[in-house]
């Protein structure tokens, strides 16, 4: 282990901290999807701008915290450990916290963040190895927390931070989600190697290749009952100029020619969408652009889709969820199904591969409503589709709706993964529900298989990975 230097100042009146940010993993997930971790990279750049030393470690690349990763951690000798995780990655997060705290004497404080820290702060802080849980977007809150700890103070009074005091779990209040999205420094791209991710299975089910994920906006103004509230419920877009500046940096400095745009709702502002697309096309970068996270389909029209095609868009996920008008209102998505269907047709004509996201098993959902969704998907112009099990996560409105009822709320390692079958929230029996999920895939992929075989981006879509991964989960009931 490297000896610690004497405490240094960053020139801003506070001590310099050595901060290790770790992206957790769920060892039981299949397939294991890996993309460059934007959250930790944004945290890293924000902390470095304040003068702190930061290292990022992605446990998904190494399939866990092994001895070689521990040697790297010991060499860095962090003062503070930040652990970022989805809820399904919480078990490995706690194992990493325990091991690092036990084997690295310099590590005095541990914080948990990401969706897990946002939705389950009490569960996270039940672990004595965790000192704080940061809810919501973590840049400002985590920086304030690091400063407080380096000054020998506690976490009291920091918005968005949960902590233990006197045997109780307390909170500094709601996280601040008002910051201008243009004010954040670009992610610390230099801390990870792009080629490590080029060979890994990707979120949008495309074949391996060098690419970069990017956020062009934060938060979503819609109030879907199943959704986390990490970024708030407004819409905070980055300006087209700011987005294009980051893309130019990645194109010229990192040799990136393919992007995954990971926004919750990239296309909410039509004029901004057109400005970004036209800015990309006018620069002649010859990019390939994918939207793996789901666009709002009823806000897409021919003008927007044509501009996206010119910019290099060749793959997009369209989040429909349910084709039942009753459920669209109940889950507060309120998608215009006719406009969404029209957008799928236009995208098909333009040669953009479309992947539909659907959810089955909502509370009160009937079998006929499930078949309404399946038929909509089957008869649509979508090239690909996935049918996910509705999953209630802690901290969401859906969780609050069903907590205390006789519906089965799974808890534990891997229980919150929407691709696995762990019971359902509808009134159908588990056996009946599993059979309908199997039939959903058979109906979609068995009806007009040419939708897949002749899609214009077939050479880039990993067909063996896409249908088999989801079909296997449906067939085996997991």
Image: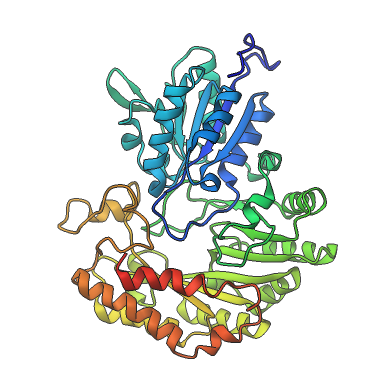
Residue 276 is situated, as x and y percent measured from the top left of the image, at 73, 61
Q: Quadrant of the N terminus?
A: top right
Q: Residue furthest front?
A: 67
* Count of labels in the image: 0
Camera-nearest residue between 330 and 250: 250
Camera-nearest residue between 390 and 336: 390
The colour mode here is rainbow
User: In which image quadrant can residue 52 be found?
Assistant: top right
Q: Is residue 216 visible?
A: no
Residue 369 is situated, as x and y percent measured from the top left of the image, at 30, 78
Camera-nearest residue between 475 and 184: 475
Residue 236 is situated, as x and y percent measured from the top left of the image, at 59, 49
Camera-nearest residue between 33 and 267: 33
Residue 228 is situated, as x and y percent measured from the top left of the image, at 42, 51
Q: Is residue 277 left or right of residue 170?
A: right
Q: Is residue 286 left or right of residue 9?
A: right
Query: Residue at horizontal 56%, vertical 80%?
Result: 344
Q: Residue furthest top?
A: 6
User: In which image quadrant can residue 321 be found?
Assistant: bottom left
Query: Residue at horizontal 32%, vertical 82%?
Result: 371
Q: Quadrant of the C terminus?
A: bottom left
Q: Is residue 73 visible?
A: yes
Query: Residue at horizontal 44%, vertical 90%?
Result: 447
Query: Residue at horizontal 45%, vertical 30%?
Result: 111
Q: Is residue 49 left or right of residue 328?
A: right
Question: Is 13 drawn above or below residue 62 in the view shown?
Answer: above
């Amino acid at each position: 282990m490297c000896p610690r230097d004497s405490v240094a100042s960053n020139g801003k009146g506070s001590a310099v901290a050595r901060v290790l940010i770790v992206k957790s993993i769920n060892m039981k997930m299949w397939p294991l999807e890996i993309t460059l971790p934007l959250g930790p990279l944004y945290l890293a750049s924000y902390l470095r701008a304040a003068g702190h030393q930061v290292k990022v470690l992605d446990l998904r690349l190494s399939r866990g915290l092994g001895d070689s990763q521990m040697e790297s951690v010991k060499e860095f000798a962090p003062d503070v450990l930040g652990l970022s995780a989805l809820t399904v990655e919480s078990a490995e997060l706690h194992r990493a916290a325990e091991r690092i705290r036990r084997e690295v004497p310099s590590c005095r404080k541990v914080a948990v963040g990401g969706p897990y820290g946002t939705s389950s702060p009490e569960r996270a802080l039940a672990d004595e190895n965790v000192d704080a849980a940061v809810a919501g977007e973590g840049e400002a809150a985590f920086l304030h927390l690091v400063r407080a700890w380096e000054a020998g103070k506690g976490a009291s009074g920091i918005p968005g931070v949960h902590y233990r005091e006197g045997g109780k779990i307390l909170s500094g209040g709601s996280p601040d989600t008002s910051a201008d999205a243009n004010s954040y420094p670009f992610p610390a791209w230099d801390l990870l190697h792009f080629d490590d991710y080029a060979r890994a299975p990707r979120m949008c089910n495309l074949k391996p290749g060098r690419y970069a994920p990017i956020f062009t906006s934060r938060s979503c103004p819609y109030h879907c009952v199943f959704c986390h509230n990490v970024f708030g419920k407004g819409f905070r877009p980055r300006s087209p100029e700011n987005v294009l500046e980051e893309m130019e940096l990645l194109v010229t400095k990192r040799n990136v020619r393919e992007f995954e745009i990971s926004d919750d709702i990239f296309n909410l502002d039509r004029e901004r969408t057109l400005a970004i697309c036209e800015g990309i096309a006018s620069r002649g970068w010859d990019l390939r652009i994918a939207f793996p996270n789901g666009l709002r389909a009823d806000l897409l029209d021919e003008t927007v889709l044509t501009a996206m095609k010119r910019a290099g868009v060749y793959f997009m996920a369209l989040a429909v969820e349910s084709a039942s008008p009753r459920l669209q209102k109940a889950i507060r998505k309120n998608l215009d199904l006719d406009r969404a269907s029209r957008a799928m047709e236009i995208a098909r004509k333009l040669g953009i591969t479309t992947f539909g996201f659907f959810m089955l098993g909502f509370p009160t959902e009937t079998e006929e409503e499930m078949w309404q969704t399946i038929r909509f998907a089957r008869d649509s112009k979508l090239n690909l589709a996935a049918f996910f099990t509705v999953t209630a996560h802690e901290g969401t409105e859906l969780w609050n709706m069903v907590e205390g009822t006789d519906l089965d709320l799974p808890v534990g390692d891997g229980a919150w993964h929407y691709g696995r079958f762990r019971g359902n929230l509808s009134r159908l029996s588990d056996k009946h529900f599993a059979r309908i999920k199997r039939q959903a895939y058979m109906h979609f992929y068995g009806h007009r298989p040419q939708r897949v075989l002749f899609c214009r981006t077939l050479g880039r879509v990993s067909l063996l990975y896409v249908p088999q991964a989801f079909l296997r989960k449906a067939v085996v009931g997991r």
